[in-house]
Image (tube, helix red, strand yellow):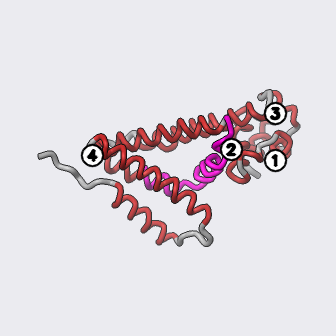
Amino acid sequence: MNNVAAKTERNGRLSAEDWAQAALDLIAEQGVASVAVEPLARRLGVTKGSFYWHFPSRDALLSAALERWEAVEQESVFGQLEAVSDPRQRLRALIQLVAHEVKSHKIYSELLKALDHPAVGPVIGRVSQRRLDYLAASFRQAGLGRTDSQHRGRLAYAAYVGFLQLSMQLHPRLAHDEFEAYVEHVMETLIPPVIRNA
């Protein structure tokens, strides 16, 4: 039994957040087009009336799910890194964090496939720009110049998106040791050595 169904069983009522999370779970499994009221109601073990208590339409649910994903991504990725003061260690921690997150990758990958959807495109645009800005700022703090920091940030983000897409297609996937060696290689390649001011 999933967490949402267990919660429903305990208190008999779903929140808008429960519906939004269930929609995200479905996006991770089957893509944006799969988000529909009846299948979600069946999955959650409730009637469609529960849905309409919280949302006027499927599009409203999708928007709420995307807002939830954007907020959780912001908090779970960047929130965990705030305490790391050294920019090089923060970049290492960021790469380690995103390399080992599976569900978020699946959601992101499915959202990339639906960029032409009017609700998805703007969210991906904001998330991507925020990530690029964060990377560029971190590389700048690590000692690179402004232009080099922007280029390195784009390269790091392109490596992330490319490997995400590749890993979704690789069968079999990389063995654990091979994957960890790849992550270490990415960090050594992208993160500049300590730059000492003359």
Which numbered disc, 1 or 2, marks the residue that appears first in the sequence?
2
Residue 134 location, x and y as percent?
A: 41, 40
Which numbered disc, 4 or 2, marks the residue that appears first in the sequence?
2
Question: Secondary structure of the magenta portion, mostly?
Answer: helix
Q: Amino acid at mark 4?
A: Leu
Dot 3 corresponds to which residue?
Answer: 51
Residue 31 location, x and y as percent?
A: 71, 49
Secondary structure of the residue carrying numbered label 4: loop
Residue 114 among magenta residues: yes
Structural distance between the alpha carbons of marks 4 and 2: 37 Å
Dot 2 corresponds to which residue?
Answer: 24
- Depth check, mark 4 against mark 2: the one in front is 4
Q: Residue at x 85, y 40 (%)?
A: 46
Residue 126 location, x and y as percent?
A: 53, 35
In front: 54, or 173? 173
Q: Which mark is residue 144?
A: 4
Structural distance between the alpha carbons of marks 2 and 3: 15 Å
Dot 1 corresponds to which residue?
Answer: 43
